[in-house]
Image (cartoon, helix red, strand yellow):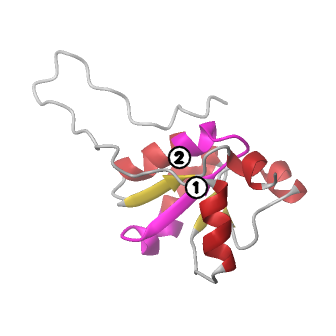
C-alpha cells in the first residue's frame, strides 16, 4: 500500500481557486529534547505511526499507536489534541513527516516530527 495515497491531491492548474497551503512553521524535535522533557515529567502526546509489528517490537513509553495508513480513518481519535503539541514518530522520520503534513492539513496547530525516529531515540 502506498502510504501517501491518503494525502490530499494537488489541484490542477485548471482549477479556478488556488489551493490552500499550510505553512510549515512547526519545528521538529530531537530525541535529546524529548528525553529531557519526559525526564522532567511533562505530559506529552506522542503518536507512533509505524506498523503494528514494529510497535510490538519496541515503543516509546506512553505513545499512542495509529499506523500511517490508518491515520485518515482514525484522525478523529486525536481531536482533543488539535490545539496542543503532538509529537509524531516512526522508525527513521519519513513516515512521521508525512503524518505531520497530514495532521497540519487537518487543522492540527503544533505537530512535531521526532528527528531520526525511534532509531535515534533508542541510541
Check the image and report above or below for 88 versus 102.
below
Confirm or deny contact between disc 2 and disc 1 (CB under 8 A): yes
| Side of 59 where 24 appears, left or right | left
Task: Find residue 96 and report its image quarter.
Answer: top right
| Side of 66 where 15 appears, left or right | left
Which segment did they paint magenta?
Answer: 76-97
Q: In the image as oriented, which residue stretches furthest toward the bottom?
A: 41
Q: Of helix, strand and loop, which one carries label 1? A: strand
Of the two numbered discs 2 and 1 on the same chain, state the one appearing first in sequence: 1
Judge by depth and name the residue closer to the eye, 84 or 82. Answer: 84
Residue 50 pos. (x, y %): 72, 48
Using the numbered discs, state the Cα–Cα distance from disc 2 to disc 1 in whole angstroms: 7 Å
Task: Find residue 43 and report its image quarter.
Answer: bottom right
Question: Which residue lies under the disc numbered 1?
Answer: 88
Number of the front mark, 2 or 1: 1
Residue at screen point 12% across, 30% down: 17
Q: Is residue 70 magenta?
A: no
Judge by depth and name the residue closer to the eye, 4 or 44. Answer: 44
Task: Find residue 47 and report its image quarter.
Answer: bottom right
Question: Which residue lies under the disc numbered 2?
Answer: 99
Residue 59 pos. (x, y %): 79, 61
Residue at screen point 60% across, 53% down: 30
Residue at screen point 49% across, 55% down: 112
In the rendered structure, find residue 26 and report the number of the disc placed on it.
none
Amino acid at each position: 500500500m502506498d502510504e501517501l495515497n491518503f494525502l490530499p491531491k494537488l489541484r490542477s492548474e485548471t482549477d479556478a481557486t488556488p489551493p490552500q497551503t499550510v505553512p510549515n512553521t512547526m519545528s521538529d524535535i530531537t530525541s535529546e529534547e524529548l528525553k529531557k522533557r519526559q525526564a522532567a515529567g511533562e505530559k506529552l502526546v506522542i503518536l507512533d505511526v509505524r506498523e503494528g509489528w514494529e510497535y510490538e517490537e519496541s515503543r516509546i513509553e506512553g505513545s499512542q499507536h495509529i499506523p500511517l495508513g490508518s491515520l485518515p480513518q482514525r484522525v478523529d481519535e486525536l481531536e482533543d489534541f488539535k490545539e496542543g503539541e503532538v509529537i509524531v514518530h516512526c522508525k527513521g522520520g519519513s513516515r512521521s513527516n508525512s503524518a505531520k503534513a497530514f495532521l497540519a492539513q487537518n487543522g492540527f496547530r503544533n505537530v512535531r516530527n521526532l528527528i531520526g525516529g525511534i532509531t535515534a531515540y533508542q541510541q
